[in-house]
Amino acid sequence: MRPIYETKADKANEQKVAEKITAARGYMMEKLARMHQMDYAAFSTGGLKAFIEIKCRTNPMAKYPTTMCGMDKVLYARQVQQAFGIKSYLFVQWTDRLGYICMDELCELDLGGRIDRNDPNDTGMYAYFDISKFKVME
């Protein structure tokens, strides 16, 4: 079984982002099961509005030209949109801004991941979204 690297601090940071989304959009954010492809389901009057994936980074938004998300998550997001008409969004909390992008935006696929934990499952195919396409939340 694969180790779980998510810490209590990671969960707290993710929760803060979910609270910002609620404050800005009025959504009720429902945390999804740990092994679900997305982090949250966003609800408002009338039902499910979107799925949300949240990433918290330790660098400013402009440091890199792209940000990455697992290819499997992007494929899932696009399949859900095609089958049910429900969009999925990637929210990224950088050190200086919170931005988001619809996961149906054009992106590049490439190998990527992290190598600092010596876990071969940390690398694979990733979707790279152009930072300039992100909308910034105020």
Image (cartoon, rainbow, N blue to C red):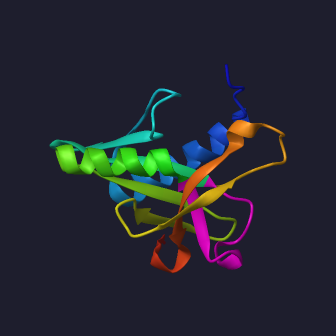
Q: Could you tell me residue 94's position as x and y percent?
A: 65, 64
Give yes or no for residue 37 being in the magenta stretch.
Answer: no
Q: Taking 120 as reference, is 137 left or right?
A: left
| Image location (x, y in percent) of residue 66 | 59, 71
Q: Identify whether 123 is placed above or below 138.
A: above
The percent coordinates of residue 28 (x first, y second) are: 35, 42
Residue at the location (29% across, 46% down)? 79
Residue at point 18%, 44% (across, down):
84
Q: Residue furthest top?
A: 1
- Region rendered in magenta: 56-69
Taking depth in this image into account, of 23 and 15 the one nearest to the observer is 15
The answer to whether residue 55 is above or below residue 130 is above
Total numbered badges shown on the rendered structure: 0
Q: Nearer the viewer, residue 125 or 81?
A: 125
* Residue appearing at x 56%, y 55% in the figure: 126
With 116 as the anchor, is 65 left or right in this view? left
Q: Position of residue 100 (x, y in %)?
A: 46, 64
Which quadrant, please, contains the N terminus? top right
Name which residue lies at 84% across and 39% down: 118
- Determine whether, in the image, residue 85 is placed left or right of residue 101: left
Q: Which quarter of the picture shows residue 120?
A: top right
Placement of 135 over or under 86, stated as above or below = below
